Image (cartoon, helix red, strand yellow):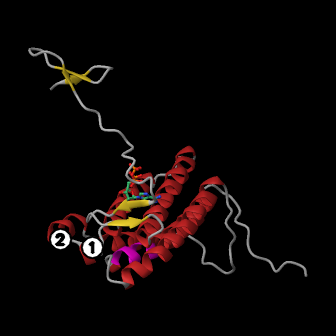
């Protein structure tokens, strides 16, 4: 197969070097504060679709950071977090494709079903069985893995708040809201599980002296 030289020319063994156009990351089309949905609509960047896409992006970035802390501790569930990050790409694709302006071909490529929600539930149940039942409010704590998972959990809840009105308007699949709702429970449970596995104490709520 053709190889690229450092200057971006395409090197074929038998033909003359051809210039390959490397696409630029910036198109400048968003500079006036508008951007595009996957269905081609132009909307202002403070539209609820872009708010939800941005929150989903923050969520997967927070999970990426948490994953690094969990990796340092040798936790065995990194494949679950990888899969969740892939699912969040699909969450984004569904949000970026308002059902109200989508053609069949768009819908086929960006549908989101209930299966990943059920998968999260299985994972939650697996960790919950190994944890002591909750008897008081815990505070985000319990080491770097646990605390970073709590940050991801809080961002997940914001993403859910952004998605709910979009789902209620019939523009995104209800399974997307369900997935985010379940994901925050998963992240909470996993935060507690990592604290337990690392032998870290979770801070609990005590009524502060008045
Ligand atoms: N600030 C934003 N927050 C969340 N999502 C965004 C934001 N800006 C754009 N998007 C979405 O992410 C996609 C990719 O973003 P990108 O930055 O390339 O868009 P743009 O700002 O419209 O274009 P450009 O950066 O090339 O001027 C867009 O098509 C849009 O759906």
For label 1, being within 8 Å of ligand 1 is answered no
Point out the residue furthest to the right here: 210
Residue 155 at what x, y percent from top left? 55, 66
What residue span does the magenta drawing correspond to? Answer: 175-182
Which residue is labeled 2 in the image? Answer: 103
Most frequent secondary structure within the magenta stretch: helix
Is 59 situated above or below 19?
below
Residue 49 at what x, y percent from top left? 40, 69
- Point out the frontmost of discs 2 and 1: 2
* Label 1 crowd bin: few (<14), some (14–19), many (20+), radius 10 Å: few
| Residue 183 within the magenta-colored segment of the rendering | no
Residue at x-position 39% and y-position 44%: 26
Q: Quadrant of residue 210?
A: bottom right
Which residue is labeled 1 in the image? Answer: 113
Q: Which mark is residue 191?
A: none
Residue at x-position 69% and y-position 70%: 139
Quarter holding ligand 1:
bottom left
| Residue 176 within the magenta-colored segment of the rendering | yes
Residue 73 at what x, y percent from top left? 57, 47
């Amino acid at each position: 197969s053709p190889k690229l030289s450092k200057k971006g020319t395409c090197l074929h063994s038998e033909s003359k070097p051809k210039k390959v156009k490397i696409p630029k990351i910036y198109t400048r089309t968003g500079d006036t504060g508008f951007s595009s949905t996957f269905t081609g609509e132009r909307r202002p960047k403070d539209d609820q679709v872009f708010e939800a896409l941005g929150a989903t992006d923050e969520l997967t970035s927070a999970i990426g950071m948490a994953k690094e802390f969990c990796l340092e501790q040798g936790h065995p569930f990194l494949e679950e977090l990888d899969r969740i990050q892939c699912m969040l790409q699909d969450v984004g694709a569904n949000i970026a494709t308002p059902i109200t302006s989508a053609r069949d071909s768009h819908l086929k490529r960006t549908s989101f079903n209930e299966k990943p929600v059920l998968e999260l539930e299985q994972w939650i149940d697996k960790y919950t069985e190994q944890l002591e039942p909750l008897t008081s409010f815990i505070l985000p704590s319990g080491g770097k893995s646990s605390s970073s998972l709590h940050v991801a959990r809080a961002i997940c809840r914001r993403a859910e708040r952004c998605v709910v009105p979009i789902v209620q308007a019939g523009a995104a699949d209800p399974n997307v809201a369900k997935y985010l709702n379940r994901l925050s429970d998963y992240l909470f449970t996993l935060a507690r599980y990592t604290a337990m596995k690392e032998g870290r104490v979770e801070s609990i709520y005590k009524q502060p002296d008045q």
